[in-house]
Amino acid sequence: MPKIDWNPGRGRRGRPLRRVLGMGQHQGLLVMYGLAAVAVLFAFAAAFGVFDGAGPKPAAPVAGAANTDSDGAPAGAASPSAPGDSSKAAGLLTASVQHYADLLATGQKIVGHTRYPSMSAYDDAFGDPRSPAAALAKFRSRPNPEADTSYLDAEQQAAAAYDGDHRGALSQWLDDMAKAKTHLGQWVVTAGQYQQGSATQAALDAAVGAVNQDLANARSDAGSLSG
């Protein structure tokens, strides 16, 4: 009866088996090393946010550096002041000039060339509501050109409408209109004196000329806003 060798690793027939087993162990180690490397890569990827949808982190702002918008301007900074509606602003000022011109024209129409020869004659006329003396007194009460300061409101509205660099035109207009208002009040006083006979026609004409010159200057100032 042939003898059975119970140790397959022995002899010539056992050598191939050991070689196969050795190769399997070697390949197993390679697989284990590969899995370990992959695990390390996944750990680094998770640490840098690859799997949480986060992209590259923006660089932190440099201390003292100003934030800027897409156009390069500082963030939150107001845009350069630019003229708004210059024609509207000029129209508001021109309308105010015309208002004072109309006041003067209304007063001139009332006074005309009526100059009473004496104070007694003036007093008699003053009692007649249809007389130039009474009409001028009513004109001084209402619309009361001597106290009219509506040009101030016109200047504020024009400044809001323009909203830009008016190169001093609004300030100059304001000065000229202040003079016009003052000279208009002086004309009203001179007109009363003219009716009473204490002021000459030349004085009345000079008072009118002063108002008209101021208003002409103011019109020029208003026109420079839209020029």
Image (spheres, grey):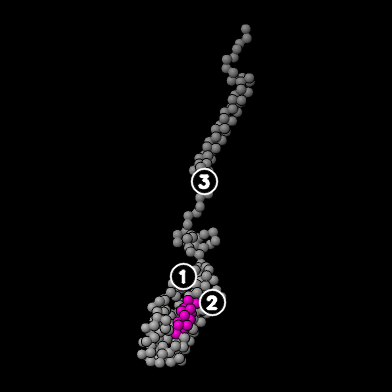
Quarter of the image with the C terminus is bottom right
Residue bounds of the magenta highlight:
97-111
Viewer-side label of 3, 2: 2
In the rendered image, the residue lying farthest to the top is 1
Residue 184 vertical position relative to residue 60 in the rendered view, above or below:
below
Q: Which numbered marker is on residue 64?
A: none
Residue type highlighted by circle 3: Ala
Is residue 92 among what the camera can see?
Answer: yes
The residue under the point 63% across, 23% down is 16
Give residue 64's position: percent from left, percent from top: 45, 61
Question: Upstream in the sequence, badge 2 or badge 1?
Answer: 1
Residue type highlighted by circle 1: Gln
Q: Are marks 2 and 1 in contact (CB under 8 Å)?
A: no
The residue under the point 57% across, 32% down is 31
SS at mark 1 in the image = helix
The residue under the point 48% across, 78% down is 102
Residue at mark 3: 54
The secondary structure that dominates the magenta segment is: helix
Report crowding for label 2: few under 14, some 14 to 19, many 20 or more residues within 10 A (C-alpha): some
Residue at mark 2: 223
Q: CA distance from mark 2 to mark 1?
A: 16 Å
Report whether 169 appears left or right of 124.
Answer: right
Give residue 144's position: percent from left, percent from top: 40, 78
